[in-house]
Image: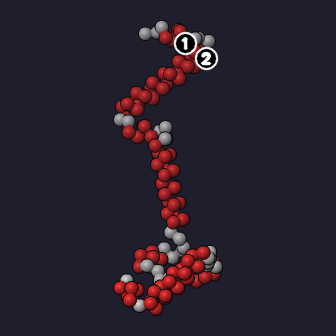
Amino acid sequence: MALLEIDAQARALREEAAQLDILLNTLPAPQASPELMAAILADAAPTPWRKRLARLWPYGPIWRPAMTLAASAAMGVMAGVWSPEIEALWTPPAQVAEMAQAEQSVAEEGFAMLAFGLDNSAWESRP
């Protein structure tokens, strides 16, 4: 700033640069062609972790098989959580036998109701 106060030529150059800056700001930003962008990206040096990843998985982008694995794992977890038979895996064997017997008696009662035309009141009054 001290030079601008002393030298008239420096002030003139600064004023000229400011006018050029204003003129350049009015122009639209140039757009790079796809060919230029591809050439720049091809010339870019790969990072060390990309080199290691390319050695481990040379078949292209890793995100595709990773997403496939994640999706199949999520579907497996959902199928396991919502499976109706999963409760039998955590239930003690004695309780499983008791549950099977209860299901059998319910099935027999339902069959008797259908076969003999009984309504629910006959079964509800039973001890």
Name the residue that disc number 2 marks: 114
Does label 2 or label 1 sit earlier along the sequence? 2
* Label annotation for residue 104: none
Nearer mark to the viewer, of 2 and 1 = 1
In the image, is residue 72 above or below residue 28?
Answer: above
Image-quadrant location for residue 100: top left
Image-quadrant location for residue 112: top right
Evaluate whether residue 87 shows in this view. yes
Residue 91 appears left or right of 67: left
Residue at image position (49%, 37%) is 84
Residue at image position (48%, 26%) is 103
Give the amino acid type for the residue marked by disc 2 in the picture.
Answer: Leu
Q: Nearer the viewer, residue 105 or 17?
A: 17
Q: Nearer the viewer, residue 100 or 119?
A: 119
Give the amino acid type for the residue marked by disc 1 in the picture.
Answer: Asn
Residue at image position (51%, 66%) is 63
Image quadrant holding the C terminus, namely top left
Residue at image position (53%, 8%) is 122
**Element assignment for label 1:** helix
Which percent across, then down, holds residue 73?
48, 54
**Element assignment for label 2:** helix
Which percent across, then down, holds residue 36?
61, 82
* Label annotation for residue 120: 1
In the image, is residue 96 above or below residue 41?
Answer: above
Colour scheme of the rendered structure: secondary structure
